[in-house]
Image (cartoon, rainbow, N blue to C red):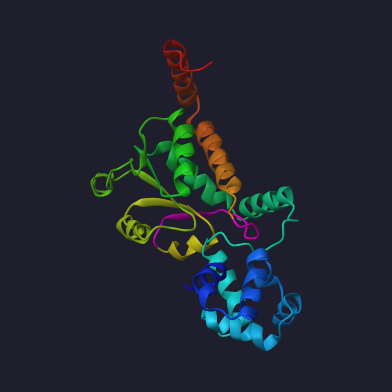
Amino acid sequence: MKQDVLSLIEQNYPTLSPSARSIANYLQQHPLAIVSQTSAEIAEHTHTSKATVSRFFRQLGFESQQDAKQAQLQLRQNGVPVLTQDNSIDQTAEELKNLSLTFEGLHADILNDVCAQLANASRVTLIGFRNSYPVALHFRQQLQQIRPSIRLLPQPGQTLGEDLHDILDDEVIVLFGFQRRTRVFKKIVEVLQDHQTILITDPTGQMYNQQVSQVLVCHLGNDNPFYSYAAPMSLVSMLSNRVYDLIGKNGHHRTQAISQLFNELGEME
């Protein structure tokens, strides 16, 4: 995977000619130009020529400015925070689009099956790394209020081998895998192939759909430098509510008992 253009500019800056440094200075001040402007436009803004712009990108290791643009866009596709749009993005509209795409893509029969599994399994294991971990942590907090035997992996500072070895026959694993996934993620999917595994992921995670039981796809947006996790959090909320409905009075009694403990321990306002 090629490096970010701005990082390459910084690395190569001492060896650049004065005209190339003019281009470098401009792109560092206007990084969006890398993907939004042509070589002619960059040349015009830097008072250089198209030939000079072409030489500049070749010096960075690209075949052309277009090659640099595609590399920059590919980095964003791979989850690297890279500016590809100006700051006029309507954040509210972006979030609503992500939520709409996510929920429109969920099939009712799959959701019913997933919620039934989460309600009836002897134990539910939630696994998440990096940005997936807070989503898994929130899901644990929700499910633990309505049913027992919920665990979250990995535990801080611990390895996974022991816990994955102890998975029960009727256990359900919810694996969260959003970009950028760790190298161990693929191996975990392989280890879990013979178990009931639900994968919650972004569209790129569909590459694992033949190795897991169900895939629930969340859209994170691709215009801002950082992904949005509004859709995964909303999906977790929906699943928790539906599981609560399926569990019925037992779930209600559990939440009441936990609330009583909160009061006894003085943990809540």
Q: Is residue 100 left or right of residue 127?
A: right
> Is residue 122 found left or right of 18 in the rendered image?
left
As drawn, the residue found furthest toward the bottom would be: 51
Using the image as rendered, state which of residue 256 and residue 87 is in the foreground: 87
Against 53, residue 80 (above or below) is: above
* Label tally: 0
Residue that extends furthest to the front in the rendered view of this protein: 18
Question: What's the residue at 47%, 26% (across, down)?
Answer: 251
The x and y percentages for residue 214 are 46, 54
- Observer-nearest residue: 220 or 78? 78
Residue 96 in percent (x, y) is at 70, 49
In the picture, the quarter occupied by the C terminus is: top right
Front residue (pair 19, 168): 19
Q: How far across and down, in percent of the image, does residue 53 sit?
A: 65, 82
* Residue 238, placed above or below residue 177: above
User: Residue 252 lies in magenta, yes or no?
Assistant: no
At 56% from the left and 79% from the top, the residue drawn is: 16
Is residue 221 within the magenta segment? yes
Pick whichever, 59 or 185, lies toward us. Answer: 59
Q: Specify start and end residues of the magenta stretch as a single range.
A: 211-225
- Chief secondary structure of the magenta portion: loop
Asked if one can make out residue 62 in the rendered structure from this viewpoint, the answer is: no
> Is 31 on the left or on the right of 237, as rendered?
right
User: Residue most toward the top?
Assistant: 264
Q: In the rendered view, would you say 193 is above or below 260?
A: below
Q: Position of residue 113 (x, y in %)?
A: 48, 47
